[in-house]
Amino acid sequence: TTLSDDAYRTLLRLKIMCNMWDGTLPSAIAVMTAAVSMDGCTVSAAEGSMSVAFTVTGPISSVMRAVVEGGYLPLKPAGIAVTYTFPE
C-alpha cells in the first residue's frame, strides 16, 4: 500500500507517541485518539481482568484500521490482552 505524505507523517508521529508511551491506559487512549481523530472517530476503553478493549466509533479509514489491527501501534503492556473493535 502506498501512503500519502500526510498519512506517512501521521504514522511516524504515532510511532513516536508509542515510543514515549508510559504504559498507562489514559496515555494509550490519547495515542489511539490521535490515530483516529482525523477521521472524526472517537475511542473508548474498557478494562477487564488482565485485558483492555478499545472501541473505535466512527468512519475510520481503511489504512488507519489496518494500522491499528495490524499491531503497528504497540500499545500492549506485558501480560495484558488487548482487543480492538470497530462497530459500524
Image (cartoon, grey):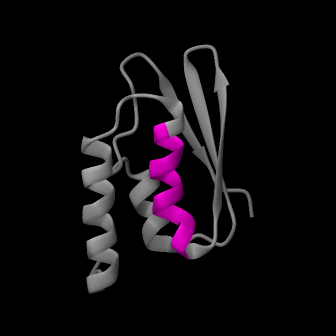
Q: Which residues are magenta?
A: 27-38
Q: Is residue 9 left or right of residue 68?
A: left
Looking at the rendering, which quadrant does residue 68 occupy? bottom left
Residue most extreme to the right: 88
Q: Is residue 16 above or below residue 9?
A: above
Q: What residue sits 52% from the left and 74% below the top?
A: 38
Specify whether 23 is left or right of 49. left
Quarter placement of the N terminus: bottom left
Asked whether residue 88 is drawn in magenta, I would say no
* Quarter residue 50 falls in: top right
Q: Residue at x 65, y 25 (%)?
A: 47
Q: Where the C terminus falls, by quadrant?
A: bottom right
Image x and y of residue 62, in percent: 50, 72
Q: Tell whether 33 sits left or right of 7.
A: right
Q: Position of residue 66 (x, y in %)?
A: 43, 62
- Looking at the rendered structure, the number of numbered marks drawn on it comes to 0
Magenta region's main secondary structure?
helix
Residue 33 lies, in percent from the top left, at 53, 56
Q: Quadrant of residue 12?
A: bottom left
**Residue 65: horizontal and vertical position, in percent?**
49, 63
